Image (cartoon, grey):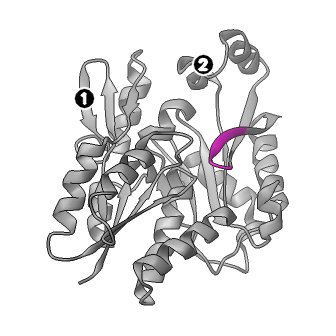
Amino acid sequence: MSIKILVDSASDIDATEAQFLGIEMIPMEINFGTEQYMDGVNLTHQQFFEKLIETDVIPTTSQINQYRFTEVFTKLTANGNQVLCITMSAKLSGTFHCAVDAAKAFPDQVAVVDSENVTIGERILVEYARQLLEKGLTLTELVTELDTAKHRIQLVALLDTLKYLRKGGRISAVTAIAGGLLNIKPVVAIVNGEVKMAGKAVGSKNGNNLLVQLINKKGGVDFTLPYATAYSGLNDTRLRKYIVDSAALWQDHTDNLPVHMIGCTIGTHAGPEAIAVAFFSRDHKETTK
């Protein structure tokens, strides 16, 4: 008997990478008008941004329902295995509650953890779970440790434009137009499982500086635990520039900053040319502010 890790595609772990990591991935449904896709299965992150940029259709995502979770739980527990299911924040989607409802039919076999995060914030919790699994923790011990550690995770992101927030109805057209005229770069963060505005900067350089300031304010990076960077769009040029500009954060700590591509769940609202950083904070007290 072994413990299988299951994660939704809001973590931006696609089907190919999941197989490489030895975990299972259940995809979100993505709709471009009448066209329906499975995130990270028959729609890659690259293809998603190509469609987002080229079309005027606003994509939508659908939560993973109880039936789909039941199917996957049935398959994964068939040989007596247990399942640790990690989902995106319950405050951003009903996916967590659907997983919990499905898990009721698998007592002592399936446990569900609300990551209280998304994209690379959710990803690094999955990576930590893999590390703990290798240490031989039981399913109960895994849940207890993850539910504690997840509150140290910080996710901050710099957006290039307010356009896609406007398209998705998150802000008014007037605010978006004003932001565009002023070249405002909004900075957002995940706070208690929700997306919150963390600041605004005029221009990319000031935005990069603000991102660095927020990382320091949130306690700095614990390099003994998983950390990651990410970008949205068709290339990582802006992220590479940020990494160079913020070298003081990383130098003397690591020679390899993991770089990932943001997928459709956050990409729908962030748009292209966004950059993000996720890490476990060294100072837990700062994470509650």
Query: Do we see residue 233 in this rendering?
Result: no
Looking at the image, which residue is at 32% across and 27% down?
31
User: In the rendered image, which quarter contains the N terminus?
Assistant: bottom left
Comparing 171 with 47, the one in front is: 171
Where residue 90 sits: x, y (%)? Answer: 52, 46
Q: Viewed as shown, does residue 76 lie left or right of 170?
A: left
Left or right of 271? Residue 110 is left
Q: Please tell me how crowded label 2 is: few (under 14), some (14-19), or many (20+) other residues with Cα within 10 Å.
A: some
Going from the N terminus, do you reach mark 1 or mark 2 first? 1
Q: 175 left or right of 16?
A: right
Q: Residue furthest top?
A: 174
Q: Secondary structure at mark 2?
A: helix
What secondary structure prevails in the magenta region? strand
Q: Which residue is mark 1?
A: 36
Secondary structure at badge 1 equals: strand
Horizontal and vertical percent for residue 279? Answer: 64, 64
Amino acid type assigned to the residue bearing label 2 in the image: Arg
Separation (CA) of disc 1 from disc 2: 23 Å
- Residue drawn 45% across and 86% down? 137
| Vertical side of 202 occupied by 261: above or below | below
Identified by mark 1, the residue type is Gln
Q: Is residue 195 magenta?
A: yes
User: 285 or 168: nearer the eye?
Assistant: 285
Q: Which mark is residue 56?
A: none
User: Where are the magenta residues, as a range?
Assistant: 192-196
Name the one closer to the observer, 24 or 212: 24
| Residue indicated by mark 2 | 166
**Residue 121, visible in the rendered structure:** yes
